[in-house]
Amino acid sequence: MQLLAPDLVGIKMAANALLEGDLVAFPTETVYGLGALATSDRAVGRVFAAKQRPASNPLIAHVADRNAAAVFAQFDPRAAKLAEAFWPGPLTLVLPLKLHTAVSRLVTPGLGTIAVRVPSHPAAQALLRAVELPVAAPSANRSGSISATCADHVVSSLGENVDYIVEGGPCAMGLESTVVDLSDDAQPAMLLRPGSIPTDDIERLVGVVARPDDRTPIRSPGMLARHYAPATPLRIDASDVRPQEALLAFGRAPLETGGPMLNLSERGDVGEAAANLYGMMRALDAENVSAIAVMPIPVEGLGEAINDRLRRASVPMPEADAA
Ligand code: TXA
Ligand code: MG
């Protein structure tokens, strides 16, 4: 694994590596992505192996702009409106996949849809412009565990399974993109994953966005219960800290504790909490504690996505994997 600077030379090397079929982790404004050339079965196959990700869980195709997305995805008027408003930026659209595209069938196994995203991070933009082909990139972490918000996290999560890492510092937003399904123009937009764009901002443009409930068939494996999880059990909405627990606090009045404690945002700002969430979860996971108690986080704005991640991170490990 080799670290690359996000300068002209580094980006050129990263682009060439992608075109050769190598795996290149790169920064986005949300989290680091583990990139592979989306038109190469071999490269995309390596992403699933590196992450130990089930082949049934589709990947997001990253491109530099909407024109590049329109080569393989179909935009209805709602999709055009959202792309216009939020791209480049942390919005992923699930759209009908055009027929006869060069995109590997491993990116979106048999779904007839494809997730597309145009990241705004300057290094991601430069890389995508240099490659001139879509780059499939899931978050750069082991499947089911915490996403990487800096290059160190990529190294500790994936190590030698990555060929290159473009080092772009910590991610500004720290939570994954919002995923909206617009693949059926006869259906209302469906929120597949709350994320870095508050759902309210999307609803202002395309009307009410449906939230999946328990009766919705799983359309997005990221919706599976346990995900984004540290190895240490997580206890949410805590109103006390028990012996042997670490505290992940929020706001001006953290709970009393003599143990390890980090505060997501002392001033009670959900944006700051989103940016700190994964790094602090990793840091407390490294403490020798029996559990991480997390104080309640308000659900407004980005709080919806933060609470979604905390809820999934708190789902107990299945017995078989608990060892
Ligand atoms: O912020 C992000 O979106 C980051 C950065 C790297 O761009 N990427 C990311 O990718 O979070 P990943 O693979 O960790 O999560 C993508 C989510 C998964 O829940 C996946 O199941 C869903 O998007 N997804 C991808 N393609 C889909 C499709 N065709 N239909 C439905 N869901 C899809
Ligand atoms: Mg992920």
Image (spheres, rainbow, N blue to C red):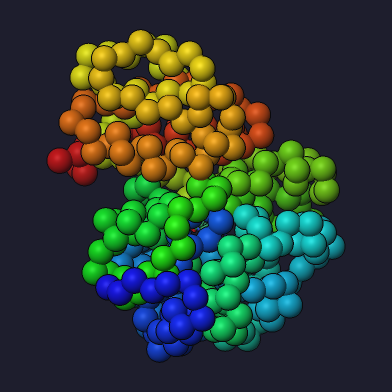
Which residue is located at x 82 percent, y 49 percent? Answer: 206
Which residue is located at x 29 percent, y 60 percent? Answer: 155
Q: Which image quarter is the N terminus in?
A: bottom left
- Which of 77 and 31 lies nearest the eye of the viewer? 31
Please give left or right for residue 65 compared with residue 205 in the image: left
- Which of 19 and 101 lies nearest the eye of the viewer? 19
Which residue is located at x 21 percent, y 44 percent? Answer: 321
Which residue is located at x 69 percent, y 41 percent? Answer: 199
Q: Which image quarter is the C terminus in?
A: top left
- Residue 79, compared with residue 135, is above or below; it is above
- Residue 162, compared with residue 131, is above or below; it is above
**Residue 316 position within the rendered picture, expressed as x and y whole percent measured from the top left:** 31, 33
- Residue 230, compared with residue 14, is above or below; it is above
- Which of 123 and 31 lies nearest the eye of the viewer? 123
Quarter of the rendering containing residue 143 = bottom left
**Residue 210 position within the rendered picture, expressed as x and y whole percent measured from the top left:** 70, 42
Point out the residue furthest to the left here. 323
**Residue 204 position within the rendered picture, expressed as x and y whole percent measured from the top left:** 82, 43
Image label count: 0
**Residue 45 position within the rendered picture, expressed as x and y whole percent measured from the top left:** 37, 75
- Which of 190 and 39 lies nearest the eye of the viewer? 39
Please give left or right for residue 32 compared with residue 216 in the image: left
Is residue 97 visible to the viewer in this orientation of the structure?
yes
Is residue 52 visible to the viewer in this orientation of the structure?
no
